Image: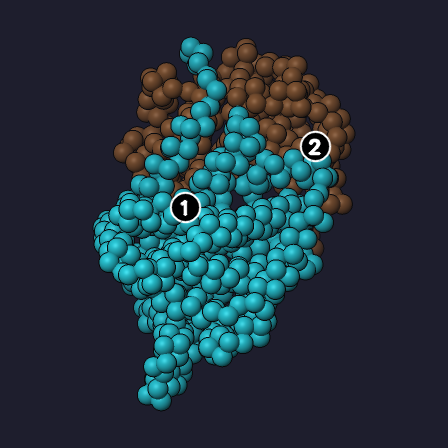
Chain colours: A brown, B cyan
Amino acid sequence: MSLSARNINKTFGRLQVLDNLSFDFPSGCILGLLGNNGAGKSTLINIMCDLIRPDSGEIIINGETFENNSLEIRSKMGVLPETGLLNTDLSGKEQLEFAALLYGIKPSDIGEQLDTMLNYFFDDLSLLSRRCGTYSTGMRKKLGLILAFLHKPTVALLDEPFSGLDPASARLVINFLKSYKREDRSILISSHNLSYVQQISTHIAVLHEGTFPFSGTHDDFTADGQNQLENSLFELIMPNEKDTNELKRVLA
Amino acid sequence: MEPIVRNKPSLAKLIVFILRTRLRLIVSGTENTALNIGRIFLVIGLIFYAFAAAAILLVSDDADRSFYYVLILSSIPAIIISSGIFPVLKLPSSVVPGYAPIPGKQVGILNLVYNLFRPGTLYGLIFLSVTSSLTYSLGPWLLFDGILLIIATSALDFAVKQTVLSAQTRGIRGLKLLIAAGIVNSVGLGTYFVMYFFTMLTDPYVYTLYLLLFTISCVIYYTYTVELTETASTTSIFSNDSVGSKSINTVSAATRLAYSRKHSTKPMYLLIPAFNLIIGLYIYFLAEETMSFVFSLMLAFPLLPFTYVHNNFWGFFRETWLAVRLSPAGNKIKWKVFLGAVWMPLLLDATSSFAALVYSGQFAMFHAWIYLLLIPPIMFMSYWSSLRFPRKVNALIAINQMTTFRNNTSGISSFVIILFCYLISFLMVLNQFVIAFFVVLVASLIVIREIQQCERNRHYKLQAELYK
């Protein structure tokens, strides 16, 4: 599914978070959304999954907009929000059952897929009988990922999928996303971890001051060669290194 | 991977799922086995209590039956409200993620079901269903009136918490007055309905009709507060004052839509509490038998210990005990923590028994001495428990829960609460209902202000620790 936006504007009070933002990303891409804290990445993801509406403009997913067919688009969308992942009163198993009900899926239809995913992410499945409120951050994140991909979405929006994960778990997530990638599926990842984004993204979009100073393929962004993602990003969002002499003086 | 067959999500299945998981929460809601066993005992105790209530209704003569009926009904709001506020304050939450492919109206229904069927409400329903099923011809009336009361109480409980305790409501003009009006209105209308209920045997429809209006009033009030606070929360997400603000995921779809379209129905909603306030005043001028309401609460108070249990009271004590043992600093303040948790039930019991003794004409000088002796230790306990805990202890979860409660009940506010409770009881005994009404209004404003101040302090402390 292709992801597009036309002239998205969003303000919160006097703060213009997204400024006439437009983009087109092809089907089958894994898009790494980069930017500073507060750049508007989460806002953009919230708009893309219809959690909040833009002041103007529209999101187009495979030719359809939320105004026309909101429920249909949502049913094909998997979302990993940054916060409010799980209901702390439910157990992991109940959470999965609830997600299946929300997407109108019979548990028998996804039995094998679910078992495979659970065994892939978790060593001890008995933990899933406990309330989600008792889970570690990493476990919540991994369960959240399974919930996001339970219904085999054609568009996945993942807000900070690597935060709180240990390196081994992050590796699991990267390999999972690589396995999930297909021509008719698009994945958007918002992350601050450039190393992980570099490993999986096919496209990059840098959000800065409400606009995309860069959006295109990963190769175009890192034209200088391998492992240049960080340098390319800093050229855009922080071209001049801040002087630390004054800092050194006051901290001495 | 093969494509998955997706059907239209079934609202009925989702409701059944929510009810099932909420029911499970009653008896196995924690990882703490002792607490789960305690909860099972609680349900058993509640069923016994329901049997006793039904027996009283069946064996009492016609003249007394309506009175006992009122007592039994009055215990239901007590179960729900007390289980909802003590000791951990919880706001209503959204069970359906905003991005799920569920139409907005169905999301609203599911969230309502989820929030209505909290364990406290379920206890009320268990009690109501057992009692009504055992009381033959009176049963359907009891069930219907009880359900109306449950809805009204839950709506009011949520509305008050939503507005008073949510950090996003700070600075909204007129809010405190609205909340106070809502609280007073509920007390006033509740009193009025109880008074009307004494005509039940001759004209039961009148009571039920008024109860229905009361319920609708509470639900509208709740709807208003939800819109007000959620809109405020949406606007504050990126403001400078956003620490502690509600996650966007918890904002309902309808509100998001309303906000995004810059559509506001505030002026219309503002009329509702104002209208209710006028009705409440009118009712108080008419009331003549309000004392019956005070007396009817007597049956409700024995249930309070049960409701504490559901809200982790046992678990709270146990977990707090374990938590304080973990650190030497915690060990030093363990009595402070436990006594801090005890003063509120003491206050409730003292106030209710005082009102009942006075009303029944049994109040004597001996009792006055008891109350005079009781107030200083309660005051001391509330003040002592409101003192600052060491930071190391603050970090522990159990103590943090207690800290939230403690912050909402400082020594000064507890003193004011005690004074107002006694004053209201006296005024009602003297049939000074109009004055009592204004006292409740003023007390509500003071308590709300105190709570908001505490919330603000907590907010600033949190900010200070975050940026330390």
Alpha carbon separation for disc pair 1 and 2: 45 Å
- Residue at the spot x=66%, y=58% of the render? B274
Looking at the image, which is closer to me, B316 or B441?
A: B441
Sort mark 2 into few (<14), some (14-19) or many (20+) by Cα contacts within 10 Å.
many
Above or below, comparing residue A184 to residue A247 in the picture: above
Left or right of B140, for residue B403: right
Q: Position of residue B98 (x, y in %)?
A: 55, 33
Per the rendering, the mark at residue B144 is: 1
Circle 2 SS class: loop
Looking at the image, which is closer to me, A25 or B373?
A: B373
Question: Disc count in the image?
Answer: 2
Q: Position of residue B36 (x, y in %)?
A: 26, 49
Q: Is residue A238 in view from this perspective?
A: no
Left or right of A117, for residue A208: right
Q: Is residue B108 in view from this perspective?
A: yes
Q: Which residue is mark 2?
A: A54
- Residue at the spot x=41%, y=46% of the render? B144
Q: Nearer the viewer, mark 1 or mark 2?
A: 1
Residue at the front extreme, as displayed: B202
Per the rendering, the mark at residue B249 is: none
The chain that hosts pointer 1 is B
